[in-house]
Structure formats: C-alpha cells, structure tokens
Amino acid sequence: MGDTIGSLKEIREILGTLPGPDDEAAAKAKDREGQLTKPPGALARLEELSEWLCRWQGSHPPRLERPRVAVFAGNHGVAARGVSAFPPEVTVQMVANFRAGGAAINQLCKTFDAELQVYEMGLEEPTADFSQGPAMGDAECANAMAYGMLAVQDGIDLICLGEMGIANTTSAAALCHALYGGEASDWTGPGTGVQGGALDNKTRVVAEAVVLHAEAKGDPLEIMRRLGGRELAAITGAIIAARMGRVPVLLDGYATTAAAAILHRIDPQLIDHCTVAHCSAEPGHIRLLQAIGKEPLLNLGMRLGEASGAALALGLLRAAVNCHIGMATFAEAGVSDKE
C-alpha cells in the first residue's frame, strides 16, 4: 500500500475509501458490559474504551495481544531560526538512545508489554525552512505519509503514535495556526524549554510562516506539505493506514495531535478511530483538543514526546479490556442483578 503512493492527489483518493465503524461489534460490547457484576456504567470511561476498541477493530471481544508503539523521528529546517532550546543533532542522539533501550519510551513499552518501532525520516537532511518556503515538495510529503502507512502491519491490534524531532513543536504550532486561525501566540509554547525572548522569536517565526503560506488556507494536506515535517506527515499516514486496517490509534501529545488534526479538518470522522492519550503541558494542546472535540485519557503535565503519553495510556486500555473480558456476569457469579 504505502510504497506505491507518490502524490498528495493519491492520498486524497484514499481518504474517500476508508471504512466506517462496526456498530454491531460495539453493540456486543455494550451488551456484555450491561451483564457484568457492577452497576451499569460504573466503570465509566473504561467501558467506553472497550466499546471503542470493538467498534474500530471490527470484532468482539476487544484484543490487545500485539500493541505497537511507533515513534517517527524527523528534523526541521526551521530549527535554524533558533526556535528550540536544543540543537538538531539531539534528534539523532535520541534515536540512538531509543535503539539502545535508554529512553523513557523503552521503559514504558516494557511496563505495558508493547512492541517499540522507531522510524527515522532522513535525519541527515532536514526539511526546508518553512519560514522561507514550503517545508516539502508534493512527492516528498506524500512519500513521508506513505512511509508512515508501513508502520501498520498485519497482526497489530492497536498502534500508539508519537514523534521525536527538534523544532517540531514549532511546526505543530504553525499547522494549528494555519488550520484554526487565532493568533500565533495561541498555539506556540515552550516546547523543549524556550522562554522569554526565545519564545517571542518562536512565536514570531510561526506567525510569519503562516502568513507566507496563506494561500494554502482551506487545504489541510497542502498546509502539511508547507508547514509540517516528515515525521508529522508520517503520523498522518499511519492514522490513515490504521483506519484502512481496522487498527485503533492512541495519539500522543501536541505534535502528534496536530498531525491528526490535518485529517480532522478534512472530515472530523476521519479520526473517530483515534483516542488522545494525554494532554501535554504545551499550552496549545488544550486548545487543539477543544478544536477537534477529543477528551484526553490522562493529564499528568507531561511534555516529553516520543509516544510516552500514548504508551502510558495503553495501561488504561489493558485495564479496560481485562475488565471487559475477565469479569463475571451476574448469571455466572450468582449475584442478583438490579430489579
């Protein structure tokens, strides 16, 4: 699938062919929840998560036998504008840390029994500086999305999506500002820790870039091409492929949610198979969650990236599935149901 896509026109065509929810599987989950030894609705959002998994996996009971955590790493030319507290070489160094097992995401995957895959997106060649021109060409953006699609392989029953890339909160802020308007300051935050004059500079770069690419307004894929990054385009592609393969998605923080917002602006239903794992400390993330109508599972003030919040939320999904499958029904337990 992914290796045959060479243009954004082909991506647009795919978006018109994506499957919808399996309401029959969701109804079976809802029916079982009503028979379990607890008051109706007592597990609240855990019940909703079991139902959501069934709706988008297309079967009942829900499965979490092979969850995958996919971290996409890319570098951004806009980093040359001094928008990050860290230099671009940190992206390469952190990818090496992932592969050596020394990052937070490695420990979280170990904790919640998830498979970790790290995808490098041409780290030696950053995207073009989007404050001067488009970040990517049409084929380059489409190829990045196609590469992301390859992360959704047969046998995966849930995918947690995240990113690593110095300056990608600048890209995320620019995407959101272009998609939803407002002021650049509404969407631009400290990222890796910029503050004071450095944050003012970052905000100014975002504002200028969105003005520069104003002609893309109203075309979300073109906004991604001009203001995004390869790793963010790959996340958008992975979300599309997950929908095609009936694989529910856990989205990580601000940058990952911004990549999903590209699809939401095309059609809000395109991300119904996605749940946002956590609300990050990046101030624009709260505003973005309101814009796409998603309530995060966790809010722990985290701002690490690398799919850490998504992997952590996997624990909640495991709890939901185990309760749904493992609890006894009233009939099985010999417990009297309500009158």
Image: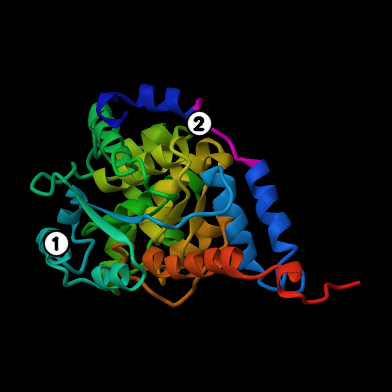
Is residue 169 rendered to the left or right of residue 55?
left
Residue 25 percent coordinates (x, y): 63, 45
Q: Determine the secondary structure under disc 2.
A: loop
Q: Determine the secondary structure under disc 1.
A: helix
Q: In this view, does 80 lie above or below 111?
A: above
- Rendered image: mark on residue 278: none
User: If you read the primary sequence from the N terminus, does the residue marked by circle 1 or circle 2 appear first?
Assistant: 2
| Mark 2 burial class by Cα count in 10 Å: few <14, some 14-19, many 20+ | some
Magenta-drawn segment: 16-23
Residue located 30% across and 41% down the image: 148
Q: In this view, does 50 lie above or below 106?
A: above
- Rendered image: mark on residue 99: 1
Question: Is 67 one of the magenta-colored residues?
Answer: no
Q: Which amino acid does label 1 sit on?
A: Arg
Residue 118 percent coordinates (x, y): 21, 54
Residue located 43% across and 38% down the image: 245
Question: Is 17 one of the magenta-colored residues?
Answer: yes
Residue located 39% across and 47% down the image: 259
Residue 272 visible in the picture: no
Residue 306 percent coordinates (x, y): 28, 63
| Mark 1 burial class by Cα count in 10 Å: few <14, some 14-19, many 20+ | few
Q: How far apart are marks 1 and 2 (CA)?
A: 33 Å
**Nearest the eye: 276 or 212:** 276
In this figure, which residue is indicated by the disc labeled 2? Answer: 18
Q: Which amino acid does label 2 sit on?
A: Leu
Q: Is the magenta stretch mostly helix, strand or loop?
A: loop
Is the N terminus in the top left, top right, bottom left or bottom right quadrant? Answer: top left
